[in-house]
Amino acid sequence: MLAKTFGAAVYGVNASLITIEVVVAQGLHFHLVGLPDSAVKESEQRVEASLKFFGYRMPRQKVVVNLAPADIRKEGSAYDLPIGLCVLQASEQITTTRNLEEYVIMGELALDGTLRPIKGVLPIAIEARKRGYKGFVLPVENAQEASIVNQLDVIGVTTIQEAIEFFEGKKDITPLETDTRDLFMTQLNAYDADFSHVQGQENIKRAMEIAAAGGHNVIMIGPPGAGKTMLAKRLPTILPPLTLQEALETTKIHSVAGKLGTRATLIATRPYRSPHHTISDAALVGGGSFPQPGEISLAHNGVLFLDELPEFKRSALEVMRQPLEDRKVSISRAKWAVEFPASFMLIASMNPCPCGYYNHPEKECVCGPGVVQRYLAKISGPLLDRIDLHVEVTPVSFDQMTANRPAEPSEVIRERVIRARERQTARFTDHPGVYSNAMMPSQLVKEICVISDAGRALLKTAMERLGLSARAYDRILKVSRTIADLAATDDIRIEHLAEAIQYRSLDRENWAG
């Protein structure tokens, strides 16, 4: 007898449905075909132990399990539950009143028949609804995540016995439903940090506001304890709120990477990722034998903070150059290629020198001759060119720290950022794929960032004195356009250009001299 149901395999951030067929015939041995990896092959032992625990048996006949299409590699242990159910139906140990073929079924079995949570639930649920399946049967720990998708019966079960009783019609399980929009709206501003907690540093807050308004990358240079990390952590709180579509994209990536945890729901706040400087190239940009999203993809629609930038391996930083431009990362293997989205804001911080006190107003730098230049040279010119704002951070004085003057809260700054972004949305209506000033390609910069003759003369002088590249020229124009948007003006004025030019600290020839 043949039994059939459906599972799924996740590639990149999208799922492909897998047909699971089981036939029991004359002969011996258990055969699992369809390009399974080791974890899938081991399902025979887990399934057999689970069935025995509840009084069922693995047929002592020839059992053939086919995972189709056969040319797609199947990975992981999430096929245990559908294989177990199909074996029982094919061997006529159960008679189902609900059709297995109307459901997508996934779940890892423990030896006592309980179900363990799996990864990549959200993209699987989205694909199941798209293909018109009635429901999705999965471990109860993952049901909350799958219920984000409406028009799909999400059936959470704790054991294989519970799944059997559901398909036999002996037990009714109420599909889990989540009001996605209501959940999204209630969690939209659930940030713990706020700019009102930061005393002083008004010039840095201004740079952060410009960065948020235009989606620009930032590097902060300053001594230890000046507040670089504190400011970076608060940047997501002034970014425009996620749209529902962005929230679904972000949640899909975290689901595929297994970062959501159990009973997780929609990610409604912008992600903030801060990897340690010992991170490998693959962990940062994604990869591995079976490609997984890296930190730059986990920061999609949010902020990637690289603390102590010169301490990162040069190779890891260099592989970020292409994703910074393209806002996606392509990982190719011999037989397939996957693409992960990586539209993030890069916020980096660094000390001005190894000891940390170069240019400090009070403490003396003890680094020897040439040490500062060698330290800065750890960051390549092409990477620095891709960072729009270079901001010097100076320590906060005692008077500023102890002042009772209330600082501007994130909510007020965010309102200005949202208004600036609205101007950009209107500007780029006819340019698909461009949503902020930082995303403008070069040809669009020439068209939109028009400056006066006086502004052109100022920019020419700055270019010659600072030795700026063509890419840095574009960056200055983009930043000045953002400053003009914050000022709600249509024209880029000379003061906007002057402010944008001052955010190129590391381009100054005498900075480390």
Image (spheres, rainbow, N blue to C red):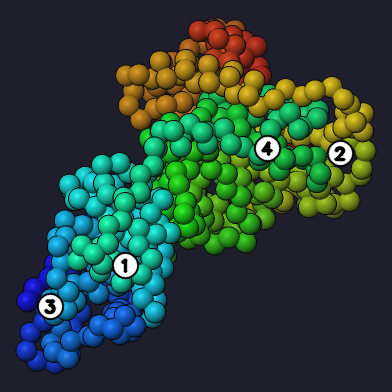
- Lower sequence index among marks 4 and 1: 1
Nearer the viewer's eye, disc 4 or disc 2? 4
Residue under numbered circle 3: 92
Select label 2 or label 3 by which is in front. Answer: 3
The residue identified by callout 4 is 193
Q: Earlier in the sequence, mark 1 or mark 2?
A: 1
Is 324 on the left-hand or right-hand side of 223?
left
Give how far apart the Cα atoms at labels 1 and 2 are: 66 Å
Residue 475 can be seen, yes or no: no
Residue identified by numbered label 1: 162
Q: Residue at x 92, y 28 (%)?
A: 399
- Amino acid type indicated by mark 1: Glu
> How far is mark 4 from mark 2, CA to CA?
28 Å
Residue 74, located in which quarter of the rendered image?
bottom left
Q: Are marks 1 and 3 in contact (CB under 8 Å)?
A: no
Closer to the camera in the image, 498 or 301? 301
Q: Position of residue 120 (x, y in %)?
A: 37, 56
* Depth check, front residue: 291 or 135: 135
Return the disc, 1 or 3, that comes first in the chain's sequence. Answer: 3
Q: Tell me the amino acid under the disc marked 2.
A: His
Q: Is residue 372 left or right of residue 219?
A: right
- Element carrying mark 4: loop
Q: Residue at x 44, y 43 (%)?
A: 266
Label pair 4/1, CB-CB below 8 angstroms: no
In 3D space, how far apart are the residues under numbered discs 2 and 3 (Cα atoms)? 79 Å
Percent across and percent down for residue 251 are 43, 46
Q: Which residue is mark 2?
A: 360
Q: Which disc number belongs to residue 102?
A: none
Amino acid type, residue under disc 3 in the picture? Glu
